[in-house]
Each structure stands twice: as C-alpha cells, then as structure tokens.
Image (cartoon, rainbow, N blue to C red):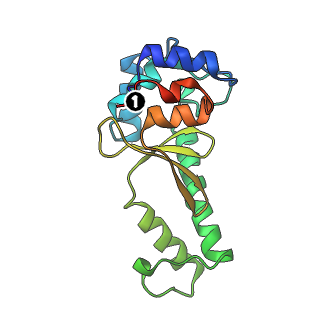
Amino acid sequence: MDLTIDFLKELRERSNEPIQFGEHGLAAPEIDAIEKDLGFPFPQDFRFFLQNTSGSGGALFPWWDFSKEAYTQSINWIIDGLIFDVRHDDLWLNRWGEKPTSREEIENTVRADFETWPRLLPIYGHRYLSAEPVESGNPVFSIMQSDIIYYGHDLTDYLLREFAPSSRLMFHRIP
C-alpha cells in the first residue's frame, strides 16, 4: 500500500492520537533545512509524511518544531540504552572483539558500532525509520535498549500497525 493523502486521511479517521494525518505539514524548504542541519537527506516517503502530517500534540517526534538538540537527544537515548545493556545485562557482540575492561573503552566501542548503523529518523516514542538507503520503503524499528524489533516493512505498514491496528485499511489493496 502506498503512502498517499487518501491513506493519511483515512488513518486520521481511525486513530485516537492527536495527530493530523493528511493535514498541511512542513513545506519542502523547511524539510530541506532540517536535512541540511542533520547532514543527510530523507527518504521520499518520509518527506511526504512530514509534508502531509501535522504532529502537534506531542505524540510524534517534533519535526514540526525541529531542533537538532532534540534529534541528538533521541539518538543518544538509543546509544545510552545499548551502553546500559552492556554494563548491566552482559550484552557484548562478537563483532566487537574482546570486551575491554575500561568503561570508556566499552562506551567507545558501542558508539563506534552505532556509527555503522543506518541513520535513524525518530517517528513516535521509540519507533525509528531507517533513513538509508535514501529511498522510499525503508523499515521501521522499535528500539528499546538492545531490544530491537522490526516493526514495519515500510513507513505505511508501520503507520497501520501503530495507529490503526484493527483497521480495514490493513486488508485492502493487497499487492
């Protein structure tokens, strides 16, 4: 199913969240400015979502009142959660090699590994869209510390699962 204005409007009718799906969102130059501030481009479906959704009410990440600080805080929250699991839940991946003894080396290893991940775009709570590759159709992940779940095969699928889980929208126009 494609992300369209009609889809967003129908989603608005079915959602209990204070989100204006299908309403006027950010203008293209505003999105361009955010991309420039972050240093990377957004996939086209995410740009469409931002242009056609108003996120007032605090349910969605505040792209409509963007601050790089809030974005960085959201991303650091992921890294801090991974570091927490390394320290308290014996998380250590084989690809990281032998576990160092120093706290600083451990944190540097986790941060260096995170830099190899695709860039992430916060959507709602702990749900993130992969920004890479820079094309429509990237997956959405639920990330809570090291508990990372594939939450939607693309932005449209995710929006259905999150905001209209029992909707008939999930069952029409099956490819």
Corner quadrant of residue 94: bottom left
- Residue in the picture at 57% in, 36% down: 161
Q: Is residue 102 above or below residue 44?
A: below
- Residue in the picture at 51% in, 44% down: 128
Residue 80 at what x, y percent from top left? 60, 61
Q: Is residue 62 left or right of residue 45?
A: right
Nearer-the-camera pick, 60 or 83: 60
Q: Which quadrant: the C terminus?
A: top left
Q: Is residue 147 above or below residue 30?
A: below
- Residue in the picture at 41% in, 16% down: 27
- Residue in the picture at 57% in, 84% down: 102
Q: Can residue 118 be seen by looking at this rendering?
A: yes
Residue at label 1?
Answer: 174
Q: Is residue 5 left or right of residue 59?
A: left
Q: Which quadrant: the N terminus?
A: top left
Residue 97 at what x, y percent from top left? 42, 84
Q: Is residue 78 above or below residue 175?
A: below
Q: Can residue 67 be seen by looking at this rendering?
A: no
Nearer-the-camera pick, 110 or 22: 22
Q: Is residue 122 left or right of residue 46?
A: right
Residue type, numbered disc 1: Ile
Residue 141 at what x, y percent from top left? 50, 49
Q: Secondary structure at mark 1?
A: loop
Nearer-the-camera pick, 101 or 153: 153
- Numbered circles on residues, count: 1
Using a 10 Å C-alpha cutoff, classify the residue at mark 1 as few (fewer than 14 neighbours), some (14 to 19) or many (20 or more): few
Nearer-the-camera pick, 172 or 113: 172
Q: Is residue 119 above or below residue 38?
A: below
Residue 123 at what x, y percent from top left? 54, 37
